[in-house]
Amino acid sequence: MTETTTDFAELLTGLGKNAKAAARLLAVAPTAVKNEALIKAAAALRRRQNYLLSENARDMEMAEAKGLSGAMLDRLLLTEDRVEAMASGLEDIAALDDPVGTITAEWSRPNGLVIQRKRVPLGVIGVIFESRPNVTADAGALCLKAGNAAILRGGSESFHSSAAILACLHEGLVAAGLPEHAIQRVPTTDRAAVGEMLKLVDYIDVIVPRGGKSLVERVTNESKIPLFKHLEGICHTYVTADADPEMAKNIVLNAKMRRTGICGSTETLLIDRSVAPALLPSILNGLIDLGCEVRGDAITRGLDSRVVAASEADWDTEYLDSIIAVRTVAGIDEAIDHIENHGSSHTDAIITENPAAAEAFLNRVDSAIVMVNASTQYADGGEFGMGAEIGISTGKLHARGPVGVEQLTSTKYLVRGNGQCRP
């Protein structure tokens, strides 16, 4: 049968109804049962590793035929180490404290009412992502631990990989006595299905778009459902005149080149103009030796003839590739102004030995994650001890920064009385 918009509406409504029913069961599922599902799913990932890699090879072959960039192929690729990281991530999430049911505050009123604020699941989480198949495991596991049902819509590039991972999650759910519908995926690569998913206001409580600018913009423009989102990861590393030269070089090279295709990769390097002649040549040489294209301002180009001229657009670009923009600044005020004008409120770092500069940067830079003397590649829920993340939110409502288990809950108020009537 040829898929039509009507077919998608029926398909997505069915997923929504199943998720809503599963969410009611998950909201009261004991912690031990949710943890068992995660641990059994981790075991399934390890046991089915060869199958996961073979399905990923199918996706990689098609992605290469489409001409995807090296950075996008790296996002898509599964290896034995990455499968083990997914499995370990599920176990890490199982080991986390369960936020559901936690009493965050309690007080009594003069009239005798006793009021508690309690953490509860959000309900049904819709996650729309692109090529990274591990998002299937991370998002599904985090939603489950927080007592939420999940509807996942992965990109066409990771279609077979994500299906294989989801089968492992389902194995864990069934083994623990939980419904398979607790974690579902949209079983089509047609983008029209995304539009139908964004209309499910009666079934989905929040949408998490995780991908490139065009995806997030589309979801933002079309969604009838509240969002956790970040538009881009235009991350900065700022090297001050007081920075330790060796530390600065090591951090910059790691922040840009460890994995260029992740949202925490540094895209713009800022450096104090007064120390650029002394510190910048070594950093530039290290970047270029690692295969990075450097686009710089006039002073940067004067220090290395291999640097190409940066355009105004470069200061506003998330490359997700082996490209970095470099600009010299007069000091911390100019650096912060640049970040405010060109950043995306994701992650920004300062490299300095000056405590006053470090505190000023921490307090004045209005980003979800602000770092001192550390690589922006640490912008990750797993690295924060959260087990994994469903994404990094750059908005300011409900959740900001890595969205982990606790951020996937809301609160409700429990009020106990003994006959009070309001006068």
Image (cartoon, grey):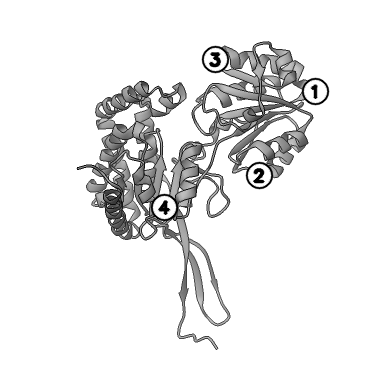
Identity, as a three-letter code, of the amino acid under mark 3: Gly
Q: Which residue is mark 1?
A: 274
Q: Which residue position is annotated with label 3? A: 291
Marks 2,3: beta carbons within 8 A:
no
Label 1 neighbour load within 10 Å: few <14, some 14-19, many 20+: some
Image location (x, y in percent) of residue 322: 54, 21
Question: Which comes sooner in the sequence, label 2 or label 4?
Answer: 4
Cα–Cα gap, marks 3 and 1: 27 Å
Q: Label 3: state its secondary structure.
A: loop
Tell me how far mark 1 sits from mark 4, CA to CA. Answer: 50 Å
- Determine whether 284 is above or below 97 in the image: above
Nearer the observer, 355 or 218 = 218
Q: Earlier in the sequence, mark 3 or mark 1?
A: 1
Q: Nearer the viewer, residue 350 or 231?
A: 231
Q: Which residue is mark 4?
A: 98
- The amino acid sitting under disc 1 is Ser
Marks counted in the figure total: 4
Kindly report which numbered mark, 2 or 4, lies closer to the viewer in this rendering: 2
Q: Secondary structure at mark 4?
A: loop
Could you tell me which quadrant the C terminus lies in?
Answer: bottom right
For this orientation, the residue located farthest to the left is 1
Whether the residues at callouts 2 and 4 have beta carbons within 8 Å, the answer is no
Q: Is residue 423 left or right of residue 181?
A: right
Which mark identifies residue 366? 2
Q: Are marks 3 and 4 in contact (CB under 8 Å)?
A: no
* Left or right, 342 with reference to 256: right
